[in-house]
Image (cartoon, helix red, strand yellow):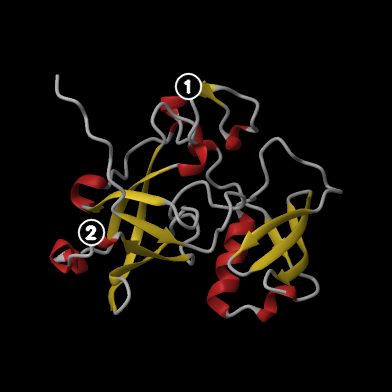
């Protein structure tokens, strides 16, 4: 048997999530999120992207780089089941897997040529932390990748879950419209760990250049503070 070479990192993504906390649990949940894919120097060959502009969506194959750990567990606790019910790891998209590989479908907004990084990809709906290594990019093919009749297991029972987002002091008004919409979408999908449900607790998450603090009670998320991390 031949030795299997290690996977090469071909690119890294630049997103508004400097930490894991708050990242949507699936790609496409918050379509207004924007991110940029920058290729590693040895993969900045424009020929490798020839024809990609004809596709509306692409698959990203990437590494859960913040979830690398020795060993693995055959069962995990999905957040949308309250964090208390265990199911098989292969019945989930948990980052804690035998191989820490992620798969995301994102919308391709465009390809831009830059003087510093060569051709970069602008995408929407990504669920990746800033700096996440990408192993491969493939076009999404609707005639084989889309299965409208497919069943979604336990995820079908929780897919409509969302919080009402309130901003009584208009703290989000200072953001540009696109960023405000993206942040509201992230908050609506409940960034809290599934096992935490304390209405008195003030949670904080980093988003782009900001730190947002909020509380959650009775299905309503209330924005309490928004500050610029640069001061």
Residue matched to label 1: 71
Side of 185 relative to 127 (left or right): right
Callout in the foreground (1, 2): 2
Residue 111, horizontal then vertical, whole percent: 27, 72
Residue 193, horizontal then vertical, whole percent: 67, 41
Nearest the eye: 117 or 228: 117
Q: CA distance from mark 1 to mark 2?
A: 32 Å
67 to 87, vertically: above or below:
below
Residue matched to label 2: 42
Residue 146, horizontal then vertical, whole percent: 27, 47
Answer few, some or many: residues within 10 Å of disc 2's Cα (few below 14, many 20 plus, some between 14 and 19). few
Side of 197 relative to 64 (left or right): right
Residue shown at the point (68%, 79%) measured from the top left = 173
Residue shown at the point (47%, 21%) measured from the top left = 71
Residue shown at the point (58%, 80%) measured from the top left = 176
185 to 217, vertically: above or below:
below
Label 1 vs 2, first from the N-terminus = 2
Nearest the eye: 52 or 45: 45
222 to 78, vertically: above or below:
below
24 to 209, vertically: above or below:
above
Residue shown at the point (49%, 58%) measured from the top left = 130
Picture quadrant of residue 120: bottom left
Q: Quadrant of the N terminus?
A: top left
- What is the number of callouts on the image? 2
Local secondary structure at mark 2: helix
Picture quadrant of residue 149: top left
Residue 42, horizontal then vertical, whole percent: 23, 59
Q: Which mark is residue 205?
A: none
Find out whether the residues at labels 1 and 2 contact each other: C-beta distance under 8 Å.
Answer: no
């Amino acid at each position: 048997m031949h030795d299997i070479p290690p996977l090469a990192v071909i690119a890294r993504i630049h997103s508004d999530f400097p930490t894991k906390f708050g990242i949507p649990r699936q790609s496409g949940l918050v379509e207004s999120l924007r991110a940029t894919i920058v290729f590693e120097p040895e993969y900045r060959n424009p020929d490798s992207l020839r024809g990609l502009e004809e596709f509306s969506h692409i698959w990203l194959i990437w590494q859960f780089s913040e979830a690398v750990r020795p060993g693995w567990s055959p069962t995990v606790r999905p957040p949308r089941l309250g964090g208390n019910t265990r199911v098989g790891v292969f019945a989930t998209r948990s980052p804690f897997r035998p191989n820490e590989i992620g798969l995301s479908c994102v919308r391709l907004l465009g390809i831009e040529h830059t003087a510093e990084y060569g051709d970069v990809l602008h995408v929407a709906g990504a669920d990746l932390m800033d700096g996440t290594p990408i192993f491969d990019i493939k076009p999404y093919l609707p005639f084989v990748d889309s299965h409208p009749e497919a069943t979604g297991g336990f995820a079908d029972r929780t897919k409509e879950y969302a919080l009402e987002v309130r901003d009584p002091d208009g703290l989000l008004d200072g953001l540009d419209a696109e960023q405000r919409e993206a942040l509201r979408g992230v908050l609506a999908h409940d960034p809290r760990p599934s096992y935490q449900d304390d209405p008195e607790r003030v949670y904080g998450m980093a988003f782009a250049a900001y730190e947002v603090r909020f509380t959650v009670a009775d299905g309503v998320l209330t924005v309490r503070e928004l500050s610029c991390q640069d001061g």
